[in-house]
Image (cartoon, rainbow, N blue to C red):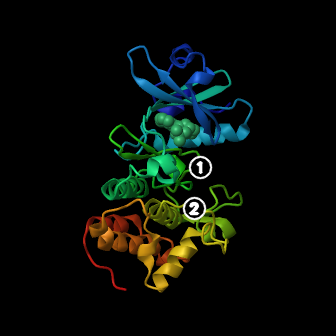
Amino acid sequence: NDTTKEDLELPLFDFNTIANATDNFSDECKLGEGGFGPVYKGILEDGKEIAVKRHSRESKQGLVEFQNEVKCIAKLQHRNLVKLLGCCIDKDERMLIYEYMPNKSLNYFIFDERKRNSMDWSKRYSIIIGIARGLLYLHQDSRLRIIHRDLKASNILLDKDMNPRISDFGLARSMEGSDSRANTIRVMGTYGYMAPEYTIDGIYSTKSDVFSFGVLMLEIISGKKNRGFRHANHDLNLVGHAWRLYKMGKQLELIDGTIKDSHVQSEVNRLIHIGLLCVQKYPEDRPDMTIVVLLLGSDIQLPE
Ligand code: ACK
């Protein structure tokens, strides 16, 4: 085990404290299964609510992801990132302790029939801009320059004010001191959100995150999930569908029918346009997050 406690620069929690907080990792406290093991809700003795990501013991991969997640986010703080409070290392157990997010993930709000109605346009817009700011912060941070690599609706958690927080940095890579793009032979991520150059050639960069962000935007606007860029079926290939509608000048058909206020149509139209810029096939054609945040916050009309 090459994770030494000194490496981490993070508050360390005692195993018993976490076991007590989560009722000994009971099923009742389990929030779900994350990419690398179960996630539990816990309550510390002072009443503070936490989420505990427990990495499975045996997994060698788990160790790599754990170190990676710690390295990437221990130093970061931003209102649109889930805050890492500390970690817990006990023999071969590794856990990450996060601030608890009471409102589940965005997945639940944009795709669940019962919940979708509660997402009016202004809420969707503030979620889009929050995610964009969080991602810009990751890309820009001069110490780390982080590429998330697995940006998707289920990794966007909502805090008590429905403010979006990017989570799950298990696959993130720091480009500190290196080129702005890199290659991998092990393509990991989520089908539907991965940029074509990443899926096909394993090339990732801040621009592959921009692609995933564009998919997320289109999903938030349409209430539909993108299943992947190879599907010819409209219901499965949201990106292709959005392009087709756009070329026919019918992009407003993309808007989720539960968004009732028609006066927002021109604004949504502009956002669809920004989303489409982000999901362009070639990474060099996509804007970087600085531009995306500027475009989102301004009322510049984009050229047709
Ligand atoms: O969509 P969810 O309710 O939000 O289900 C998943 C599950 O754990 C597996 O990842 C939830 N989860 C992860 N981190 C947190 C957190 N910091 N606060 C609350 N729930 C979390 C996630």
Q: Nearest the camera: 228 or 98?
A: 228
- Of 245 and 22, nearer the camera is 245
Element carrying mark 1: loop
> Which residue does the image show at 65% across and 72% down from the upper left?
233
Res 166 visible: yes
Residue at image mark 2: 193
Left or right of residue 145: residue 3: right
Coordinates of residue 153 in the picture (x, y in percent): 51, 52
Tag 2: amino acid: Tyr
Residue ID for mark 1: 171
Along the horizontal axis of the image, is 299 left or right of 117?
Answer: left
The residue located at (51%, 71%) in the rendering is 279
Position in image of residue 166 (x %, y %): 45, 47
Q: Amino acid at mark 1?
A: Leu
Q: What residue is shown at x 60% (from left), y 21% (from top)?
A: 25
Q: x, y (%) of residue 266?
A: 30, 74
281 to 29, vertically: above or below? below
The x, y position of residue 95, in whole percent, is 58, 29
Q: Is residue 147 above or below residue 167?
A: below
> Would you identify the image quadrant in which residue 150 lies?
bottom right
Residue 189 shown left or right of residue 85 in the figure = right
SS type, badge 2: loop
In the rendered image, the quadrant that contains the N terminus is top right
- Whether 82 is drawn above or below 237: the answer is above
